[in-house]
Image: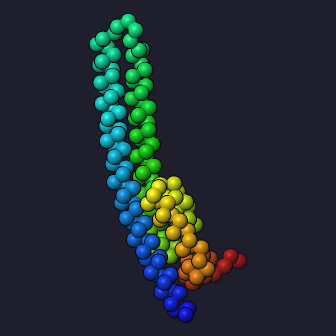
């Protein structure tokens, strides 16, 4: 029975690692969409600046307002790109940690942030947290002090 539980846990961890790698790739590709958003914002700012300088009419909005809209879009694009990049890198290292059965707390944090990204991130995050909470899986993830003592480092003293 114990061997069956270990086999099931190993398979679940292997699948979760694979899905985290896939999610990392999807996050990084999604970040490329924000690069297009940034390019569009730059084109908007250039277009608005030439438009506002060529036709100053009565009743027209102030010239700086159009540039401000472009700046807001630019900042949103940069923040979105950075968030997608961070999620992709975090998911990659979570997948690697699952495969190595290390960094359990880091995997928890990444999974919690993935839960914000519906629907795929939510499903992956919840299943990862549920699997990591099993006592049999906890035993598979060695604590840093256990790794140090296995390496022959001993304790402080």
Q: Residue at x 56, y 65 (%)?
A: 108
The N terminus sits in image quarter: bottom right
Q: Is residue 47 visible?
A: yes
Q: Is residue 147 visible?
A: no
Residue 56 rendering spot, x and y as whole percentages: 34, 9
The C terminus sits in image quarter: bottom right
50 lies above or below 21: above
In the displayed structure, does residue 134 sit left or right of residue 100?
right
Q: Residue at x 48, y 70 (%)?
A: 97
Residue 146 rendering spot, x and y as whole percentages: 60, 80
Q: Quadrant of residue 156?
A: bottom right
In the displayed structure, does residue 150 sit left or right of residue 36?
right
Q: How is the image coloured?
A: rainbow
Residue 139 rendering spot, x and y as whole percentages: 59, 81
Q: Residue at x 45, y 42 (%)?
A: 79
Q: Residue at x 55, y 60 (%)?
A: 112
Q: 77 or 59, which is in the foreground?
A: 59
Q: Farthest right residue?
A: 157
Q: Farthest front residue?
A: 119
34 lies above or below 7: above
């Amino acid at each position: 029975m114990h061997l069956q539980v270990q086999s099931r846990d190993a398979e679940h961890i292997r699948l979760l690692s694979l899905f985290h790698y896939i999610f990392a790739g999807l996050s990084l590709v999604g970040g490329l969409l924000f690069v297009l958003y940034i390019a569009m914002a730059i084109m908007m700012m250039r277009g608005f600046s030439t438009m506002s300088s060529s036709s100053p009419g009565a009743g027209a909005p102030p010239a700086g307002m159009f540039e401000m809209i472009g700046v807001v879009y630019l900042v949103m694009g940069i923040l979105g790109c950075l968030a997608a990049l961070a999620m992709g890198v975090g998911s990659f290292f979570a997948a690697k940690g699952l495969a190595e059965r290390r960094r359990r707390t880091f995997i928890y944090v990444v999974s919690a942030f993935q839960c914000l990204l519906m629907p795929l991130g939510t499903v992956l995050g919840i299943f990862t947290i549920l699997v990591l909470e099993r006592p049999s899986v906890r035993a598979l993830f060695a604590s840093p002090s256990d790794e140090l003592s296995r390496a022959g480092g001993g304790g402080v003293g």
